[in-house]
Amino acid sequence: MGVVLFDGVAYGMLLFLMAVGLSITMGLMNFVNLAHGSFAVVGGYAAAVLMNQLGLSYWLALVAAFAAASLLGAVLEFVFYRRLYRAHPLDQVLLSIGMVFVSIAALTYFFGPSMLPFNLPPALQGQFSVAGLELSRYRAFLIVAGVLVLALLLLAMGRTRYGAMVRAAVDNQRVAGGTGIHVQRLFFLTFSLGCGLAGLGGALSLGMLGLEPSFPLKYLVYFLIVVCVGGAGTITGPFIAALLVGIVDVAGKYYLPEAGAFLIYVFMIAMLLLRPNGIVPKKGIA
């Protein structure tokens, strides 16, 4: 039971890292970006290619994954997304889901349909013992990384000028603009940050989930569950939801493998009935 709980928490941390950017952008822009997983896979592929072909270290590859996804997000926000912020939701869905299929086709063309080969650094390989349990070093690293990112985001949103502007724009964009906040620039920076976090999560998932071109479509529903159950526009909500989803998913596959992913959808329905506005309702970014 202890190992299952540990693995579930590690899996939940990955979901949080990849989904928290979507929560922030949905809360700020009211834009449902179904292509969010594409930025995760771009970060993962960037890290894997740099490590496999250029010999870059794992730690630098994580930084490069964040940078690559942020840069791609910045370009796409400037070229496509900002034109549809006030468009009909159907137009937003068509744009973002179209980007998902474009990314799948492009990655399949350049890298093939199979998973990328990937080797963890020696420091993250193997296991260690705690209270008689054999736990994975890599999964422990994922948990530490997730907690660290959560702490940095809460600090940035709660103690910095940028965070104050984001909170103001989430509460009321028109009033925020009237106080001199450049809302369009704030959208640009926040969207890039969210994409970068997705790319970092994609790179970290290489050693646990593996990456293939269909990744953005395969895990799209998980990102949406984490954001909707946790509360769009918050940070702590998706963190709690991701942990719950990870534990339920891993425990379900371990104890009830015949149920598959069915338990996740039961969990989602139950939580939305109990907390229709999310575990942490939006009151600014917190």
Image: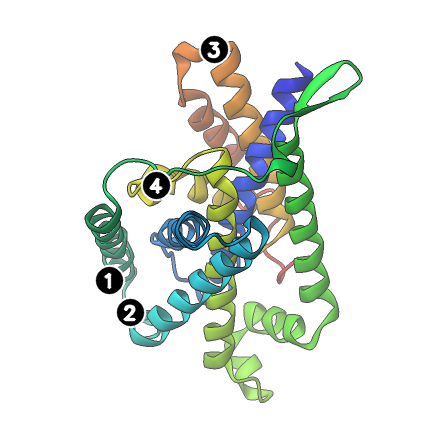
Q: Earlier in the sequence, mark 3 or mark 1?
A: 1
Mark 2 sits on what residue? 87
Mark 3 or 1: the one toward you: 3
> Residue 242, image x and y in percent?
56, 38
Residue 149 makes an appearance in the image: yes
Mark 3 sits on what residue? 256
The residues bearing labels 1 and 4 have C-alpha atoms spaced at a distance of: 23 Å
Q: Nearer the viewer, residue 2 or 267?
A: 2
What residue is drawn where x is 42% and y is 36%? 210
Mark 4 sits on what residue? 215
Question: Helix, strand, or loop for circle 3?
Answer: loop
- Number of numbered labels in the structure image: 4
- Amino acid type for the residue under numbered disc 2: Ala
Q: Earlier in the sequence, mark 1 or mark 4?
A: 1
Query: Is mark 1 in CB contact (under 8 Å) with mark 2?
Result: yes
Residue 275 makes an appearance in the image: no
The residues bearing labels 2 and 4 have C-alpha atoms spaced at a distance of: 27 Å
Question: Badge 2: few (under 14), some or many (20 or more) residues near its Cα, within 10 Å?
Answer: few
- Amino acid type for the residue under numbered disc 3: Leu
Mark 1 sits on what residue? 91
What residue is drawn where x is 46% and y is 21%? 263
What residue is drawn where x is 51% and y is 48%? 201
Q: Earlier in the sequence, mark 2 or mark 4?
A: 2
